[in-house]
Amino acid sequence: MEKIALFPGSFDPFTIGHESIVSRALPLFDKIIVAIGYNTDKDGFFSLDRRMTWIKMVFKGEKNIEVIKYRGLTVDLCRKVNARFILRGLRTSADFEYERAIAQMNKVMYPEIETVFLLTLPEHTHITSTVVREIIRLGGDAHAFMPEKIKL
């Protein structure tokens, strides 16, 4: 059975931290699906199509990475695409507590799913999409925090 991991998020914008998690997880899975979700708690700063285009550019030529968008529960998408793993990055202990609760809820809803956590590289720990978005919104240069292939 193919080992498929789903890496869900709003990715608004996609950062070098996100890129690192996907790249480092590639040897662990046969396929990684980067799934851009519609977040009901957030209004997207960048359009969903723009985020999809950016992420596809970052991983262009990588046959084991797919980029999709979705609406609804992540576990429902996992069932639909036959993903048995959810990939998540952890920057801080607060991230762990938040992600642990979600992983346990997902496990109840879909017992076959496993959540795999990768620690963010130390040099990426301070990077969040929220802060990068604010830098961009205020006219600052956020290129140091985003993959090289993404041009604003």
Image (cartoon, rainbow, N blue to C red):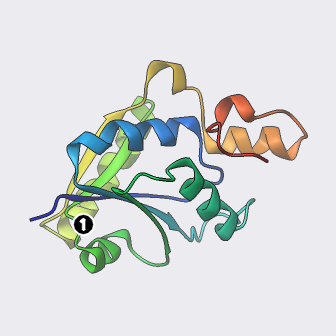
Q: Residue furthest right?
A: 139
Q: From the viewer's perspective, is residue 77 above or below residue 52?
A: below
Number of callouts: 1
Most foreground residue, 104 or 43? 43
- Label 1 crowd (10 A; few <14 / some 14-19 / many >=20): many
| 106 displayed left or right of 43 | left
The image quadrant of residue 97 is top left
**Where residue 55 appears, x then y in whole percent?**
56, 55
| 148 displayed left or right of 6 | right
Q: Amino acid at mark 1?
A: Ala
Q: Residue at x 59, y 53 (%)?
A: 57
Q: Residue at x 12, y 66 (%)?
A: 112
Most foreground residue, 50 or 114? 50
Q: From the viewer's perspective, is residue 149 above or below residue 3?
A: above
> Which quadrant is the N terminus positioned in?
bottom left
**Where residue 107 appears, x then y in whole percent?**
19, 62
| 151 displayed left or right of 100 | right
Q: Residue at x 56, y 71 (%)?
A: 38
**Looking at the image, can residue 11 be seen?**
no
The image quadrant of residue 50 is bottom right
The image quadrant of residue 54 is bottom right
Q: Residue furthest left?
A: 1
**Looking at the image, can residue 53 be seen?**
yes
**Where residue 65 appears, x then y in whole percent?**
39, 57
Q: Residue furthest top?
A: 122
Q: Report the residue marked by disc 1.
A: 83
**Where residue 46 appears, x then y in whole percent?**
73, 60
Is label 1 in a helix, a strand or a loop? loop
